[in-house]
């Protein structure tokens, strides 16, 4: 999960949205997507502001906090997934899970090279509940993360190699490449101006790989 830093101002579009929710739903989604560098707030998949890709999600749910429906500090953009993600936290209490408006969200969930994730601290009940509530270890989402990790050589996909002897598994990146991945997970963009998907997973795995490298390995 990637920390989303809300701006200190109240954008005028939110007043318009409250007055006419249907008309201004898209402009609000567009603003949120820009703020999040077109990443889903919970799953870090790439999203766009159109109806087929994303929706407006209330961090403190409308069920628990209906008065915060149009509160800029309570809304994020999320992917329209049907098997995992925002859909499954509809009635979750704000204190039941780790959400992307908490700076510590980037370290409380640990991402593994095989695409899975776990609580960085096994005793962190909020982190464990977050993974369960949002389905962050759903097989479809795990495969998406693993495919991206494989594509950048951060994980030797031994199981996939076992079933496909001709699979091309890239070599591990060197020190400079790992450092580029770590730096890029913060702010480096693709040509379209968007950040890479799953940036926190990439950063954590690259940092761990860098620590494991022998000093004489480049």
Image (cartoon, rainbow, N blue to C red):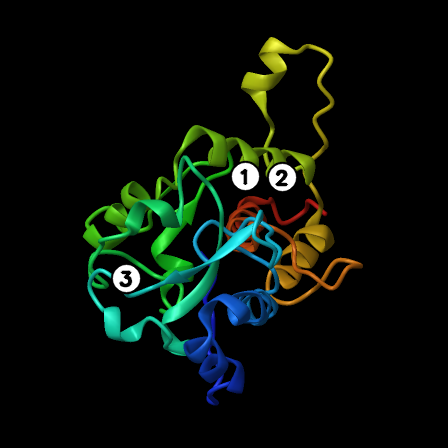
Relative to 18, residue 204 above or below: above
Q: Are circles 1 and 3 on residues that touch, CB within 8 Å?
A: no
Instruction: From the image, tell me which residue sits under label 2.
Output: 148
- CA distance for labels 2 and 1: 5 Å
Circle 1 packing at 10 Å, graded few (<14), some (14-19), many (20+), is many
Q: Are circles 2 and 1 on residues that touch, CB within 8 Å?
A: yes
Label 1's element? Answer: helix
Relative to 17, residue 194 above or below: above
Label 2's element? Answer: helix
Which picture quadrant has residue 3?
bottom left
Label 3's element? Answer: loop
- CA distance for labels 2 and 3: 31 Å
In the rendered structure, the answer to whether residue 206 lies left or right of residue 63 reads right
Give the number of the disc on residue 63.
Answer: none
Q: Residue 168, percent across and down?
A: 74, 23
Q: Residue 45, percent across and down?
A: 55, 48
Instruction: From the image, tell me which residue sits under label 3.
Output: 61
Relative to 160, residue 33 above or below: below
Residue appearing at x 22%, y 69% in the figure? 65
Q: Nearer the viewer, residue 133 or 185?
A: 133
Which picture quadrant has residue 203?
bottom right
Relative to 21, residue 195 above or below: above
Circle 3 packing at 10 Å, graded few (<14), some (14-19), many (20+), is many
Q: Count the marks: how many?
A: 3
Residue appearing at x 62%, y 56% in the figure? 48
Instruction: From the image, tell me which residue sits under label 1.
Output: 145
């Amino acid at each position: 999960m990637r920390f989303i830093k809300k701006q200190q101002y109240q954008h005028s579009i939110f007043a318009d949205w409250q007055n006419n929710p249907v008309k201004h739903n898209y402009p609000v989604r567009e603003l949120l997507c820009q703020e999040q560098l077109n990443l889903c707030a919970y799953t870090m998949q790439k999203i766009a502001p159109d109806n087929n890709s994303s929706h407006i999600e209330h961090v403190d749910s409308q069920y628990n906090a209906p008065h915060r429906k149009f509160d800029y500090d309570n809304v994020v953009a999320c992917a329209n997934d049907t098997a995992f993600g925002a859909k499954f936290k509809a009635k979750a209490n704000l204190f039941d899970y780790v959400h992307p408006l908490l700076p510590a969200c980037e370290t409380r969930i640990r991402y593994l090279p095989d695409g899975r994730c776990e609580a960085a601290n096994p005793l962190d009940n909020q982190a464990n509940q977050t993974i369960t509530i949002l389905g962050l270890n759903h097989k479809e989402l795990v495969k998406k993360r693993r495919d991206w990790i494989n594509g950048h050589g951060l994980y030797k996909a031994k199981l996939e190699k076992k079933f496909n002897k001709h699979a091309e598994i890239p070599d591990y990146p060197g020190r400079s490449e790992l450092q580029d991945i770590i730096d890029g997970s913060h702010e480096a963009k693709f040509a379209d101006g968007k950040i890479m998907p799953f940036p926190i997973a990439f950063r954590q795995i690259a940092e761990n790989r860098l620590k494991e490298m022998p000093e004489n390995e480049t």
